[in-house]
Image (tube, grey):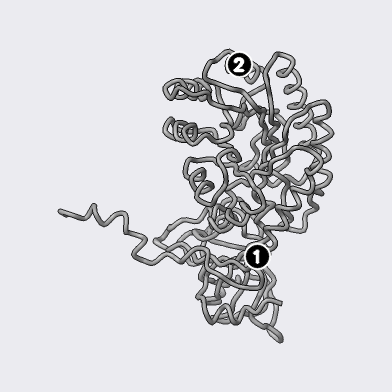
Amino acid sequence: MFNYEELFQTYKTPFYLYDFDKIKQAFLNYKEAFKGRKSLICYALKANSNLSILSLLVHLESGADCVSIGEIHRALKAGIKPYRIVFSGVGKSGFEIEQALKLNILFLNVESFMELKTIETIAQSLGIKARISIRINPNIDAKTHPYISTGLKENKFGVGEKEALEMFLWAKKSAFLEPVSVHFHIGSQLLDLEPIIEASQKVAKIAKSLIALGIDLRFFDVGGGIGVSYENEETIKLYDYAQGILNALQGLDLTIICEPGRSIVAESGELITQVLYEKKAQNKRFVIVDAGMNDFLRPSLYHAKHAIRVITPSKGREISPCDVVGPVCESSDTFLKDANLPELEPGDKIAIEKVGAYGSSMASQYNSRPKLLELALEDHKIRVIRKREALEDLWRLEEEGLKGV
């Protein structure tokens, strides 16, 4: 059992704590699932882009799925090789495209005809041939939260089958484009295997047609991985996920690219926070803690539910429903409603669980609150992997504008 008391003697709350051994095992599980086929596991940086996490994955031969030039540079800084980096995203700027091409990454996932022509123009100006993949929107319901559903025709991501074919043919004829992959990603936090298999079969059929037309595909990019259990949901077995994709690719000699993020880091992370006050209003019990929605946005943004565990010994204290809330001036600054917790006192510590994904990576300085300390637990030792911001960091980039005021 981990000794939190020693931790609290050294570090003030709130802070993130990640179990690196869990991250390592989660990544290796993907490698094992796809080991029977040429494959590349590209960790999705948007889930958590801390450099120490990326460095851990580098040693496991991870690639990187990036959605900004900033994420590409983070991946490179951590030691991920350019030929293991793919650049996704519906709104790449001309600057980002130019930089990615100069860095000679594996390929760019293209999301529109206009973007394809922009890449072609930039590649021509650089005198190079741009490796590209085209993201196909298979119009399949992923059965996930609407904010993270990406594979329906009403979503902004990818292109339909007809337009994808036109784009591939355009790229084939171009002297400055090299189409090397097909790509799809129908959504995040997937708990149903059927839509994934359906999308794989649909896009595999398209890939076979493209190869028949003389397009030299080398990769089959299946997007993100499986979901995680936040509320005791039944999750997809990784073996079934991999086998479903592999079966869909029968007859295709392509390297599989998988881009998991959430399922690599989510279960590794805890947000450790301290009780400031308890209060009752209109017979409603509130537990007010020192972490806020700026530190962990998922409950406010997605109405996501994360289990809360009391760390402080609470034997003999009466248990009753309460809302666990933060100090930010928003009614949505709530971590969990109607949580059955014992009576808590100022200074008691609680852990918000499974926050390794889309926690620190979505944090902000809203209400002028510095971003949190991040700690790693590895080989039974604790180390700092991101320092807590100082108050001065909140306005450091604004001070120059005060000159002459």
**Pointer 2 residue:** 172
- Residue ID for mark 1: 19
* Amino acid type, callout 2: Lys
Position in image of residue 357 (x %, y %): 61, 54
Residue at horizontal 65%, vertical 39%?
A: 149
Residue 112 appears in which quarter of the rendering? Answer: top right
Number of the label disc, if any, that sits on residue 405: none
Frontmost residue, 192 versus 179: 179
**Element on which disc 2 rests:** helix
| Residue 386 placement (x, y as % from top left) | 49, 63
* Cα separation between marks 1 and 2: 46 Å
Within-10-Å neighbours for mark 2: few <14, some 14–19, many 20+: some
Mark with earlier residue (1, 2): 1
Residue 22 percent coordinates (x, y): 70, 61
Q: Is residue 202 left or right of residue 268?
A: right
Which quarter shows the N terminus? bottom right
**Going 43% across and 58% down the picture, which residue do you hit?**
365
Q: Nearer the viewer, residue 122 or 231?
A: 122
Report the number of numbered marks.
Answer: 2
Residue 186, located in which quarter of the rendered image?
top right
Write the residue at 57% across / 82% down.
Answer: 345
Q: Say above or below: 142 vs 25.
A: above
